[in-house]
Image (tube, grey):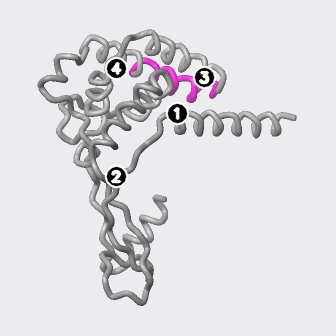
């Protein structure tokens, strides 16, 4: 993708798309009532574990690059987080710290992908609850292709015309979990085939 961006930037009149603050799209910052449910001690523990894990992973990659060792230390942190009784508001606060431009916690940005991945691995159901709650609270805007013969359209991408449509989309949490399980099973099967 970076290569494509470089090529596009070298074209005359090409404009780079602006970075979008995730919090502009969805509400991640807990409001005053929800802030009382945020456990800052848990957040600090998770940050500390993730920061140490990030350092350990880098050390292993620079020395032995042992994938099993990385998996084992990652699993330890996932288990620690799994044992915590995290609230939705605590996870929302962590996500806000990771992805908001206005967040004051700059340290988290150094390992935000790892942090979010660990929370996802340990608290899938809770993470899905957060995003399904957000998705059902608001409508989403989608692009729908229209016939090129039509004169009414909002956007034209590579010659194809699109119209913006606002939709309320219901997300089925169980279906998402089943899809992920199937994806993981397919990965396992492909890994087993390679080993054989």
Is 13 rendered above or below residue 120? Answer: below
User: Which residue in the protein does label 4 denote?
Assistant: 47
Marks 3 and 2, the one that precedes in the sequence? 3
User: Which residue in the protein does label 2 denote?
Assistant: 168
Question: Residue at (72%, 33%) from the top-left corner?
Answer: 188
- What kind of element bears circle 4? helix
Q: Are marks 2 and 1 in contact (CB under 8 Å)?
A: no
Q: Is residue 160 left or right of residue 102?
A: right
Mark in the foreground, 3 or 2? 2
Label 3 neighbourhood size at 10 Å, few (<14), some (14-19), many (20+)? few
- What kind of element bears circle 1? helix
Question: Residue at (52%, 25%) from the top-left corner?
Answer: 57
Marks 1 and 4, the one that precedes in the sequence? 4
Residue closer to the observer: 123 or 196: 123
User: Which residue in the protein does label 3 denote?
Assistant: 71
Using the image, tell me which numbered label, if any, was put on residue 174. Answer: 1
Is 125 rendered above or below residue 7? Answer: above
Q: CA distance from mark 1 to mark 4?
A: 29 Å
Q: Is residue 156 magenta?
A: no
Q: Main secondary structure of the magenta part?
A: helix
Q: Is residue 52 magenta?
A: yes
């Amino acid at each position: 993708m970076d290569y494509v961006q470089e090529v596009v930037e070298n074209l005359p009149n090409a404009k780079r798309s602006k970075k979008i603050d995730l919090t502009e799209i969805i509400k991640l910052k807990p409001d005053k009532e929800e802030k009382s449910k945020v456990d800052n001690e848990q957040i600090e523990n998770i940050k500390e574990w993730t920061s140490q894990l990030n350092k350990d992973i880098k050390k292993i990659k620079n020395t032995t690059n042992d994938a099993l060792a990385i998996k084992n230390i990652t699993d330890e942190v996932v288990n620690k987080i799994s044992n915590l009784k995290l609230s939705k508001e605590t996870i929302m606060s962590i996500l806000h710290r990771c992805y908001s431009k206005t967040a004051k916690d700059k340290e988290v940005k150094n390992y935000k992908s790892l942090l979010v991945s660990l929370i996802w691995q340990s608290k899938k159901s809770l993470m899905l609850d957060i995003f399904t709650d957000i998705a059902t609270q608001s409508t989403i805007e989608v692009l729908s292709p229209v016939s090129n013969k039509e004169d009414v359209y909002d956007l034209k991408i590579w010659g194809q015309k699109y119209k913006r449509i606002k939709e309320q989309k219901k997300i089925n949490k169980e279906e998402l979990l089943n899809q992920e399980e199937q994806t993981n099973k397919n990965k396992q099967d492909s890994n087993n085939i390679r080993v054989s």
